[in-house]
Amino acid sequence: MTLYPKLIEDALATVRYPGNGKNLIEAEMIADNIRIDGMKVHFSIIFDKPTDPFMKSVLKAAEAAIHREISNDIEVSITVESKQAARPEVGKLLPQVKNVIAISSGKGGVGKSTISANLAVALAKLGYKVGLLDADIFGPSMPKMFDVEDARPYSEHIEGRDLIVPVEKYGVKLLSIGFFVDPNQATLWRGGMASNALKQLIADAAWGDLDFFLLDLPPGTSDIHLTLVQTLAITGAIVVSTPQAVALADARKGINMFMNDKVNVPILGLVENMAYFTPAELPNNKYYIFGKEGAKRLAQELHVPLLGQIPIVQSICENGDNGTPIALNDDSITGQAFTSLAQSVIEQVEIRNASQSPTQIVEVSKK
């Protein structure tokens, strides 16, 4: 029997690619490199992505088609090619990002996302390159806080890969699952789906050169937290709490999670949010609604820095709802508090980097 390329192509034309229903020839998935050496055949099949879900089944079907349509005696060798470069492996993600900072809270309702948004803006105002990932998959709030709810990020082909381009506002590069889901519908995902979505927002996005990459985490401890410490080497964590006892108890658990021997992420410090209430008409008055300096005492007890005490003023809520973070306003008490917080974070990151070795990504052993 004499083999020739047209014979091979005719056999491959009987194989359909499940993704679009076309056969491999119609879909132009067979590279122009069919090589024949006696009864040995080699060719390449081109897939859009190196993670194509139909890859294995298509390879088996192509080999089976040649045996079925021509001869079982043919030795088939197939190479996989991809139009898109593979995602970098864990440990080599975001090579241009200098510092990754996780912003966490032991419980919800303490203003963690408000702190994240305003810290990002304050750092950007100080001249740093800042990225902010809304990692609260089930309750994304950053699109509203930055007034970009209608934004729909697009992808660009960069260095052989299709990468999501973050939305930019107030000097901050921003991505959130909120850009990709209906804001009026609950996000009903299992843990694995949420973790995979988060990995995409990290690894398949064009974050570029950043001084600080802030991660606004969901409250508490969950699969999302584990996914992050397994995906990125986190420079340090910031824990947000209010002064009241119940919030402090949960903040203690949050700090413990990062300081756990298996996770071992340095704590940059604690932020006391809603530290006191100051009426706009009485800017020098302080009313300690939720207790006085509880987070300050916890920071002293655990030997971690107190990065800042953020007051409650009516405008902080209004600005968040309007999509204009109050850190934009240097003249306000709260705006100044966020500038001070940003400076404290910069200082603690510098101390951490000078005195400690880089954080290691958490490896989970499978038994």
Image (tube, rainbow, N blue to C red):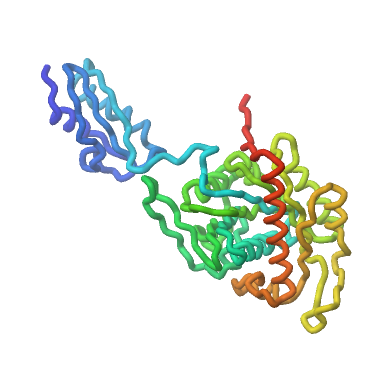
Q: Quadrant of residue 79?
A: top left
Left of 15 or right of it: where is 284?
A: right
The quadrant the N terminus occupies is top left
Q: Residue furthest bottom?
A: 281
Query: 258 or 222, which lies in front?
Result: 258
The quadrant the C terminus occupies is top right
Q: Position of residue 205 (x, y in %)?
A: 47, 51
Q: Is residue 137 visible?
A: no
Left of 164 or right of it: where is 134?
A: right
Where 79 falls versus 127 (above or below)?
above
Left of 119 or right of it: where is 301?
A: right
Q: Position of residue 73 (x, y in %)?
A: 22, 15
Q: At x 84% / y 57%, what residue is drawn? A: 296
- Number of residue marks: 0
Left of 8 or right of it: where is 346?
A: right
Query: 70 or 124, which lies in front?
Result: 124
Q: Position of residue 138 (x, y in %)?
A: 61, 55
Q: At x 51% / y 44%, what residue is drawn? A: 95
Q: Residue furthest front?
A: 354
Where 42 falls versus 347 (above or below)?
above
Query: 261 or 14, which lies in front?
Result: 261
Q: Is residue 39 visible?
A: yes
Q: At x 19% / y 26%, what residue is drawn? A: 35
Q: At x 75% / y 61%, what residue is drawn? A: 110
Q: Position of residue 337 (x, y in %)?
A: 73, 68
